Structures are given as structure tokens and as C-alpha cells.
Image (cartoon, rainbow, N blue to C red):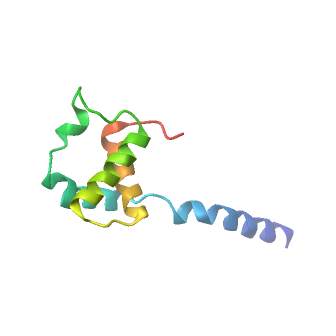
Amino acid sequence: MKLISSVAFCCLLLSPLTLFAADIENGKELHSENCLSCHTTAKYTAKTRSIKDLASLEAQIKRCDYSLGTQWFDEDITDVITYLNNDYYKFNAE
């Protein structure tokens, strides 16, 4: 019984992590449907790119969300950030 209680407690502790995990496929889809209407992916790999860390990537995504009027939820913004960082930027999450 003690083992079952311990396992249940661990599952409860870890469940918020899975609930808020980024959905990279959603980020990719949102990116394709919205971001590519303004620019290509070459912007992300250009030597002169202005995005230098995750904070500036998040700020830019929020600016674009506002400019396009997409009104994404915070989870959508996180999904797009995660997709772009995973596929292009490769910043370390701290």
C-alpha cells in the first residue's frame, strides 16, 4: 500500500510538467499558417539575425502575434517559441 501511495504521489507531482509541455507540432502549424505570410525561414538562420536568446525570441513572437492580430494563447506562443528554438535557434533553456 505504501508503494502505491508513493507512486500516486509522484504522478501528481509530475503531472503539471506534462500538462504544460510545449506542443511542437502545434507551433509548427501556427508558424506555417501565420509567420510565413510575412517572411521565410531564412530570417532565422541569417548571420545578421537580431534574435540572440530565448527572451528576445519570445519578445519577437509576441510582437508578431500583436501585429498579425492572431490573439494566440500563451500556450500557442510557447509552442511557436519551442518549435523555432528546436528547429532553428538551438538556444539553451535555462
Specify the farthest residue to the bottom. 1
Q: Residue at x 17, y 38 (%)?
A: 42
- Asked if residue 37 lies left or right of residue 94, the reply is left
In this rendering, the answer to whether 81 lies above or below 3 is above
Q: Quadrant of the N terminus?
A: bottom right
Q: Residue at x 24, y 33 (%)?
A: 45
Dividing the picture into quarters, in which one does residue 31 lie?
bottom left
In this rendering, the answer to whether 87 lies above or below 18 is above
- Asked if residue 27 lies left or right of residue 6, the reply is left
Give percent across and percent down for residue 41. Answer: 19, 43
Q: Residue at x 26, y 65 (%)?
A: 70
Name the one closer to the observer, 68 or 91.
68
In this rendering, the answer to whether 3 lies above or below 65 is below
What is the total number of numbered labels drawn onto the structure image? 0
Name the one closer to the observer, 3 or 13.
13
Q: Quadrant of the C terminus?
A: top right
Dividing the picture into quarters, in which one does residue 79 lie?
bottom left
Give percent across and percent down for residue 37. Answer: 13, 55
Give percent across and percent down for residue 15. Answer: 61, 65
- Asked if residue 37 lies left or right of residue 48, the reply is left
Name the one closer to the observer, 20 or 72.
72
Q: Residue at x 19, y 61 (%)?
A: 33
Specify the farthest residue to the right. 2
Give percent across and percent down for residue 2. Answer: 86, 69
- Asked if residue 67 lies left or right of residue 82, the reply is left
